[in-house]
Amino acid sequence: MRKRERTGFWFVLPCLAGVMVFYLIPFADVIRRSFQKASGGGFAGMYNYVQVFGNRAFKLAAGNTLCFVAVCLPLLLLLSLTLALLLQHTAASKLFRSAYLMPLAVPAASMVLLWQLLFDNHGILNGILGQNVDWMNTDASFGVLVFSYIWKNLGYDVILWLAGLTAIPGNIYEAARVDGAGSAKCFWYITLPNIRPAAFTIVVLSLLNSFKVFREAYLVAGGYPQEKIYLLQHLFNNWFQELSVDKMAAGSVLLALAAAGFVLLLQKSWDREEEM
Amino acid sequence: MSRRRIICICIACILLAVSFAGCERNGGDKGDTDQSKENAVLTEGSGRFVERETAVPDEIDQIAAVRMTENGSLEVIGRNQELKAYYLLTSGDMGESWNVTQIQGLTEDYYPRIAIAPDGTTVFVPFTSNGTVNLKIADIQGQTAEKPVTMPETGDSDNNVQQAGYDDLGNLLFLDMNGSLLKIDVDAGTYSTPFDTQGIGINYFGIAGTTCIAVYDNGCYVFHTETGQSMGTESALTELIRRNADLASTSSDSGYPMAFTQDGTDGLVFASEQGIFCQKSGGNVIEQLLDSSLTFMGTGNVVFYGVAMPDAENIFLGLSDKQGTKLLHYRYDRTAAAVPDQELTVYALDESNLLREAVAVFGQTHPDIYVNLQIGMSGEDSVTVEDALSVLNTDIMAKKGPDVLILDGMPLDSYIEKGILSDISDVVDEVEKEDGLFKNIRSASETEGHIYAMPVNFFIPMAAGDADTVKAAASLKTFAARARELGDANPSKPVMPADGTKGLLRELYYADSARWRQEDGSLNEDVLTDYLTAAKTLYDVDQYSADNDRTEIFGGDGTVDGTKVSSLKIDDLFMNEAQMTLGTMGGAGSYQLAKSAETLSKTSCAVLNSGEVSSYVPYLLTGVTADGNVDMAKEFVKVLLGKEVGADAEGIPVNRAAFAGQVEKTDQAVEIDSSIGIGSPDGGEFYGYEFVKLTESDIDVFTGWIESLEKPAMTDRVIQNLVLEQGEKYLLGEQDLTHTVQAIRQKVGLYLAE
């Protein structure tokens, strides 16, 4: 190890130790437990994984979580990028940035009150529509969850996109315009390739943030919400309360594998495009 | 090494240390009992006071006053409630043997205030009549003399004595209805007011030697009893009272939240629900001599009649809890460890006085074991069932879980499936052999030949009303139909009592839920539909609107202040608040009360059946964790299931001997209280009825009901909450029946599928 690297190592050590103690070592224990029986700790082989794959609640929760990510992620990325592009050259861009970040400052508990105010039987939405529907107990609850996620994270992603956009040197655009390139061509050939590194970070962060929407869903509808918003986190939370450590461990390993696989695929495709 | 490198290493070390700083266990997470144990260690050093209940002669069933006399004997005034007689008990050997003298010449059946003087004479204080209270002064031979004393005027009504006490010089003090402290000149029949309380009303007082501690809402005054001068040592006690508002006033008729005496060195010794404490003479520091968590003092709803301290190593305490009065002897055992060497952890989600009683009884026979009683939802914080279970499960996974689990509201099936619980059939067999158990309850607790959880007692879902209503209690469907009939016949008269949506759903849930689970584990849709339909019929029969919803009487699982109570109220029937009612019935005492009320309401009651199975509501479902100290835990379970603990509790004990004891006590209850009076909720009318004795036939009927019970109601609180939550929406008209059934099935289905 070179001297410079050794110095760097000392600085990284505290953080690394924290990650090891609080994440990596516990996760190694989770992997171990996923092959053990809940009681007695005897070796269970793949039994827990078979149980999890055959579990109706797991299938439902995994399907809902996947569906939620598949709907929310592209929608959020598209909307936030569009807004960032519109804001990029707006005079009042700073004001808008702050405004878009406001939802992030709203605590989850307050959000829940807002949800109830809007979507309860006696809520504002029913008042407007003249109906008496408990929206959180219908299929519409999924839409409410998606809306909540987009509303909360849009501003954050806009800021990230804006950071990526402002990093693109202005002279590239000037040169392109001199050569006769229009706005569309500038976006396609200059903006998009240059914001690719930022896009990777934004996608990963948005994916991770999508898991946090559980807090609102749990607070407003409890551990057993309407089927459409029953997410993996609900399941893990409930498994923990029943002490189903075996299933919880196997489910966690599967989830970690899926998330890691997604991120690695994303990174690989990014790297490939970089090389091209 | 360069300076730069040193700085880098230092910064790295600091960051590393800071990153782990949060790993320290938060002291605030410790339960009350842990804290108490810590206090005990801090204050006691080596040796400790060990509790033992002192037996008093059979004639005595109530203790009224306790004191050490000048000649060094322990004196107790006891009462026989049935004979309405008072006795003077004296003991010169620390309560090992007693001289019993019946007090002669008492003209009243009941004397509300009694105090013992240092020379052994006793004053019996009756109610004041025409401004005068005719005291009966009994000497140590039991002969009485009457001494009239004029009381201060209080307008129209007579000024009764609220409390009486003697100091060590023989001065008699009274507290009157105005909250004034009076010094009584018995011979002259007059009073004086040497104590300046600055116009503040005194709630109660205590005397230790020549010190009078007068407690008011926000603190206390400390006076010299002879001179009436303030002694200026009230700050520590005042601080204590301000920290615990329960110490400031008394809700009992004759006992007090604190009792005071003096130790051999002029120090102040006092007892409260938290334990026994000592304040050294002239000092301002209060030292804890005894932590109440292991004793009868800590069982909840305790009031004190007196404390006596013959020497530094012995303390006698007269107290009353929900089970009656006791004389307790605390002896300092120098050989005992400051805190017991072994620890047994008992965990329950909800507070339970019965459980605390069991801890105290267990402590009597196992002084070497510290019972750490942990309550998941103490009510003092905002802990939910989910939070409590998460913490409990974390402990269980870390192999630091409790030894005994009270499984009420917990996922019992899941715990059995995971192997968390140990088979306790051997202890159950032992108890059955010794005292007998209700076989049907035992059988219903078996899982594939093993017993993993056994209730300590249980309640029966009941219905009451006229003969047709009782007949209709055979099923929920017929019961609901009967309600409609009554509603149609007399629309202006309420049919059901106002128990609220969840209250009604819960009572029906207890009666019906035992038949909901199908063989594949899912909920039976038809049965669930019937349940909701019956609930809706019963709710709608009085046409309450959503805006005028009835309030819930009982919160959660029907526990009030740590005591699980019966919810069947016959009173509603004779007060014309309802024509039919339903609710749970506890032990023989509840049945006797219902039978007595029936004489006025001209109704009767019967088990409310689902139509298929007859169910019961188990209480204190006790299990032993496989990873804990199984042997010690089973010892505790044996005490919990034993006849000593269950007999006095509300609820039907699973222990047959305890049940027999309960039935026996119903006879005594009639002797003590011959009639019951009750006012209507609006205060407009007053109803009274005789307390009836249960006949052999009544007892046979009650026992028959118990023996007919087949299955426990579902106790899993997750399912119960989901059903009640959705059911309430249906009752209030926010959701139709189909959607409600679907929502319950979907949510419960998810829970069961997990």
Image (cartoon, rainbow, N blue to C red):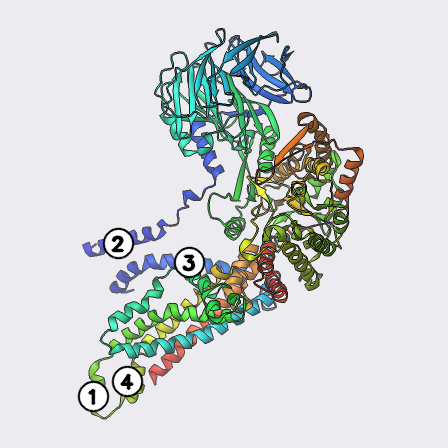
Q: Which amino acid does label 2 sit on?
A: Ile
Q: Distance between the residues labelled 3 and 1?
A: 51 Å
For disc 1, the marked residue is A175
Q: Distance between the residues labelled 4 and 3?
A: 42 Å
For disc 3, the marked residue is A109
B527 relative to B301, above or below: below
Label 3 SS: helix
For disc 2, the marked residue is B11
For disc 4, the marked residue is A190
Label 4 SS: helix
Lateral position of residue B314 relative to residue B602, left or right: left
Q: Residue B359 at x, y = what percent?
A: 58, 34
Q: Residue B25 at x, y = what percent?
A: 42, 46
Badge 3 and badge 1 in a common chain: yes
Near mark 3 (Cα within 10 A), the count class, few <14, some 14-19 or many ≥20, is few
B12 relative to B80, above or below: below
B152 relative to B752, above or below: above
Q: Distance between the residues labelled 1 and 4?
A: 11 Å
Given residues B98 and B690, the one toward you in this image is: B690
Q: Which amino acid does label 1 sit on?
A: Ala
Select label 3 or label 1 by which is in front: 3
Label 2 SS: helix
Q: What residue type is labelled 4?
A: Ile
Near mark 2 (Cα within 10 A), the count class, few <14, some 14-19 or many ≥20, is some
Q: Distance between the residues labelled 2 and 3?
A: 38 Å
Near mark 1 (Cα within 10 A), the count class, few <14, some 14-19 or many ≥20, is few
The earlier-in-sequence mark between 4 and 3 is 3
Q: Are marks 3 and 1 in contact (CB under 8 Å)?
A: no
Given residues B539 and A233, the one toward you in this image is: B539
